[in-house]
Amino acid sequence: MHSFVYRANALLTLGVTVLALMCAMASLSDNLNVPSPSAHVHVLNINWFQRQRDGNDEVSLTLNISANLQSMFTWNTKQAFVFLSAEYETPKNSLNQVSLWDGIIPSQEHAKFWIHATNKYRFADQGSNLRGKEFNLTLHWHVMPKTGRMFADKIVMTGYRLPEEYR
Ligand SMILES: *[C@@H]1O[C@H](CO)[C@@H](O)[C@H](O)[C@H]1NC(C)=O
Ligand SMILES: *[C@@H]1O[C@H](CO)[C@@H](O)[C@H](O)[C@H]1NC(C)=O
């Protein structure tokens, strides 16, 4: 009898120790889960590129936007808002930012995607600065948690350039 209680107690102690260890490992692995989002955008086509009657340059692009933002999602994530912007310099402004596309990612399984689309919002300059212009494409995201604060981040993709001539 005595030895049975002793054994049960020893087992219980072992159980609690294992549980504590598992909790420690779980929280450690949570901290080790470093987010590693990725994004790539290919300009598949310049559909047209013109100087509009108001004197402003405007271009229509067909894009392949692919991204994997799955590591941004946790049990606490409600959804994420993403948008793609073109960013470039002109003599007047050091940063011109034009939003081209946006979307809402409702869940982790939708956070790895690629879409083939023409720019949803107009890529127009305030002036005629776009010929031969180098630009960056930046994928921004805002992650909305179920509780706690929203956070935002982005990936900058460099090395894009518009044609020298209107077409
Ligand atoms: C878009 O990019 C993805 C990932 O790089 C690729 O799998 C897909 O075939 C591309 N689609 C088009 C239409 O180019
Ligand atoms: C593109 O992004 C790079 C890196 O952030 C930056 O150094 C460069 O000035 C940007 N280029 C343009 C045209 O905005």
Image (spheres, grey):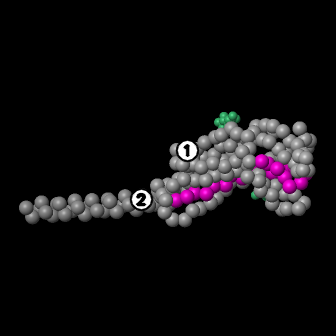
- Amino acid type indicated by mark 1: His
Q: Earlier in the sequence, mark 1 or mark 2?
A: 2
In the image, residue 145 above or below residue 112: below
In this view, the residue in front, 15 or 65, is 65
Q: Residue furthest left?
A: 1
Residue 39 at x, y percent in the picture = 66, 47
The segment highlighted magenta reads 122-145
Report the residue at 54% width, 49% height from top. 106
Classify the position of ligand 2 by quadrant: top left, top right, bottom left or bottom right.
Answer: bottom right
Report the residue at 90% width, 41% height from top. 166
Do residues under tags 1 and 2 come within 8 Å of each other at their CB atoms? Answer: no
Q: Quadrant of the N terminus?
A: bottom left
Q: Quadrant of the C terminus?
A: top right
Label of residue 110 in the image: 1
Label of residue 25 in the image: 2
Asked whether residue 142 is drawn in magenta, I would say yes
Q: Nearer the viewer, mark 1 or mark 2?
A: 1
Residue 36 at x, y percent in the picture = 59, 52
Residue 161 at x, y percent in the picture = 83, 46
Report the residue at 34% width, 63% height from top. 20
- Choose top left, top right, bottom left or bottom right for residue 143: bottom right
- The verdict on label 2 being within 8 Å of ligand 1 is no
Q: Which SS class for mark 1?
A: helix
Asked whether residue 112 is drawn in magenta, I would say no
Distance of label 1 from label 2 (alpha carbons): 28 Å
Report the residue at 57% width, 48% height from top. 105
- Amino acid type indicated by mark 2: Met
Residue 49 in sight in this render: yes
Instruction: Count neighbours of disc 1 (C-alpha within 10 A) and say few if under 14, some if 14 to 19, many if 20 or more.
Output: few
Q: Is residue 45 left or right of residue 29?
A: right
- The verdict on label 1 being within 8 Å of ligand 1 is no
